[in-house]
Structure formats: C-alpha cells, structure tokens
Image (tube, rainbow, N blue to C red):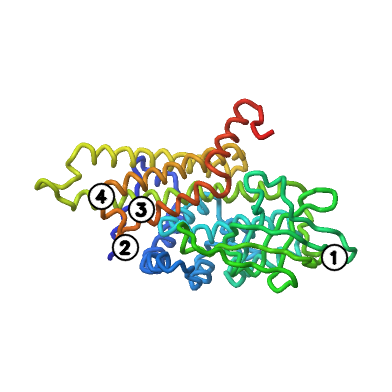
Amino acid sequence: MNYNNYKSVDYFNLDDFYSSEHKLIRQSIRDWVNRSLKPIIDEANHKHEFPKQIIKQLGALGAFGPYIPLKYGGAGLDYISYGLIMQELERGDSGIRSVASVQSSLVMYPIFEFGNEEQRQKYLPKLASGELVGAFGLTEPNHGSDPGAMETNIVDKGDYYLLNGAKMWITNSPIADIAIVWAKDEQQIVRGLIVEKGMSGFSAPETHNKWSLRASITGELVFENVKIPKENILPNIKGLKGPMKCLNSARYGIAWGVIGAAMDCYDTALNYALERKQFNKPIASFQLQQKKLAEILTDITKAQLMAWRIGTLKNDNRATPSQISMIKRNNVQMALNTARESRQILGAMGISGDYPIMRHMINLESVITYEGTHDIHLLITGFDITKISSFK
C-alpha cells in the first residue's frame, strides 16, 4: 500500500496561519509515519505488541517534549508545533501518540515545571532522546475520576520516604525507566516523586487482553515499602494542582492528536467511496454517502479551528483548564463519530484489517475515557458555566 497518497484535510485554509517551520515539522512527522509506522502498525496491533524500536526514532524526530527548552534536550518549539506533532502521530495510531503524550506532558513537563535544576539536568535530556522511557502514576484501582481520594502514600522516615500503594492503566509502565508518581504524605497533601526502575519493592506488571490501544504497552505500578530518596521528590509543587496541570498539557495534545485519527478515517472513506461501484456507479455519487462525507469534513474542520485557537491561547499562556477540557471532549467525540461513520461507508470492508478505520475506532474508545472521561469533561464545563460543582 502506498501511504504517501494520503491527502491532508484543510477545507478552511488553516495552513495560512501556520509558519513555514510548523509545516516543516508536520511534514517530517508525516513522512516518518508513512515510512516507519504505517507499514508495521497493523501487525503490531494484531499481535498486541508495542514496537519498541520506535522510541529512539521518536526521540530523534524531536517528538518527546518538543516544547522543552534546548538546554534540557527539548526542541524549544511552540505549542502549535506540539499539537501538529501529536496530530500526525495519531494519524498513524492513537497508541503511539499516547507514548509520546505520556513522555512529553506527563513525565518531562512535571520534571521541567516542578523539579529542581539537578532533576532537570539528570532526566530531561535522556527522556528527550528516548534513552529513558517514563510513565505517569495517578489513576488507582479504586480511584479514577476522583484522584483526590488516592490511597497511595508516602511516610517520612528521616533520610527517605517509604512509598506504598498501586496505580493502574499506566501507559509505558512495563518498559518505563522512571515513573512520576503522585502520593499523599502524612498530612494528606499530594506530592509528586520520581520512582526509578530497580528500586526494591517496585514492580510494573503488564496489563493483557486489551481490545483497544493494542500497539501501546499498558500496565500497573505497584509499590511495597519502596524507599524513595528525598532528592527524588518534586520540590516545587504540592497538592492536586500538580497532576492536574500535567493532565491539562496531555489533554491539549490529545485534542490535536485525534484530529489525525479522524483525517485518516475520512481520507480512507473518501477514496473508497470514489472507487467502490454499486449499481454501475461509484457509491460516492449517492446522496447518503455524500451526506456522511460532508458532515465528517465539517466536523473535522470545526475541530481544527478549535485546536488552532487553543494553540494560540496556549502559546500566550492564556488557555484555561476549562477550555482545554472542552476541546478534549469535543474533538475526541468528533473523531470517534468520524470513525464510526467512515466504517459504514466501507460497509463490511470497514471491519477488515486491510483498512485502518476499525483500529482507529477501538483505540478512540480508550481515548474518550482516559485523561478525564467524556462525562467528567462535560461536568467541568458545567461547573465553569454555573460555578456550581456537581462533584460534591
């Protein structure tokens, strides 16, 4: 299959707003996806295997922490560049974008934002290159949408902290060299800490039998009396605002990423509709198919406009958590609806592994749940409108 035949979607000429650097970055990631990811992703998905060889490749591309300053190994790019990178990666596969999102927004971001200079110098360059892989531990077996009720805890033992608890549904955990873990101290204040692979009592079993994100590796983080050196505490943050700021960064990237999945589904459906003939003419000539394609294109265009606008706001440090919450919810729903409608255009062929649509669809069933569920994001917007919390 010639993956270079992909035609990007830009009905409202949004490229007019992107710099030559933005377009060059987007094209470099697009070329890598076509060359190195598309040919292997379906087999990886079928085998439920994460293609580990891509980690160093993504590091070389600058896909890890692209907005992190150059002095720490990042590319020093703006947030629209980050969004475009996530978009092109998710055009390949949501699971692969998840790997980059976690490394960038949930591991590198908190070390840069909440860590000290020694921690930044020690970890960020190796995370940027892919020499180190990171994971993010917030969700627990009994606490997902209510992270404030977390049970994972640390106890001050003088020279170190003793960590106990467990996290689950953790992207990268079985292969992670470090994990950014959030736990409550003895005063019930949430603290961030860096847990390193090999620490006694720390294990990361893999989660099996997933029907979604099968090309991404997922697992748990289990802590049984793990001794955490005090220099591994993130010193510049206390409370739930720490992990929430990380999630805001990740949600921003997701809002861009899912546009890529939607565009891949649309491109596949459009080409199929033009080529597939029934009743002696292409099915693209039928009104119902044109209706589907027109609605999909409209929805993608609206999502692109929202993403561009939130990107400009984020570049100016003006994007609010509620705005990011809204766009994450809207764009993921758009992408999932696009996958479902595109699958119908292909008919029975839509479930075939010869086409990417079903893989995108089942991946997006996870994306609509993680980093804040679809319904929770709706309630975040409701709170912003009414100033009345529905959570308590």
Q: Could you tell which of marks 2 and 1 lies nearer the N-terminus?
A: 2
Cα gap from disc 3 to disc 2, whole angstroms:
11 Å
Q: Residue furthest left?
A: 280
* Amino acid type, callout 2: Tyr
Find residue 333 and report its horizontal and vertical position in percent.
45, 42
* Amino acid type, callout 1: Tyr
Give SS at disc 1: strand
Disc 1 marks which residue?
Answer: 160
Which quadrant of the structure image shows residue 325?
A: top right
Does 199 sit above or below residue 355?
below
Tags 2 and 4 touching, CB below 8 Å: no
Residue appearing at x 62%, y 64% in the figure: 134
* Amino acid type, callout 3: Asp
Mark whose residue sits in front, 1 or 3: 1
Find residue 353 and report its horizontal and vertical position in percent.
32, 61
Q: Could you tell which of marks 3 and 2 lies nearer the N-terminus?
A: 2
Mark whose residue sits in front, 4 or 3: 4
Cα gap from disc 2 to disc 4, whole angstroms:
22 Å
* Amino acid type, callout 4: Gly
Q: Foreground: 341 or 164?
A: 164
Which quadrant of the structure image shows residue 73?
A: bottom right
Q: Could you tell which of marks 4 and 1 lies nearer the N-terminus?
A: 1
Disc 2 marks which residue?
Answer: 3
Residue appearing at x 78%, y 60% in the figure: 233
Disc 4 marks which residue?
Answer: 347
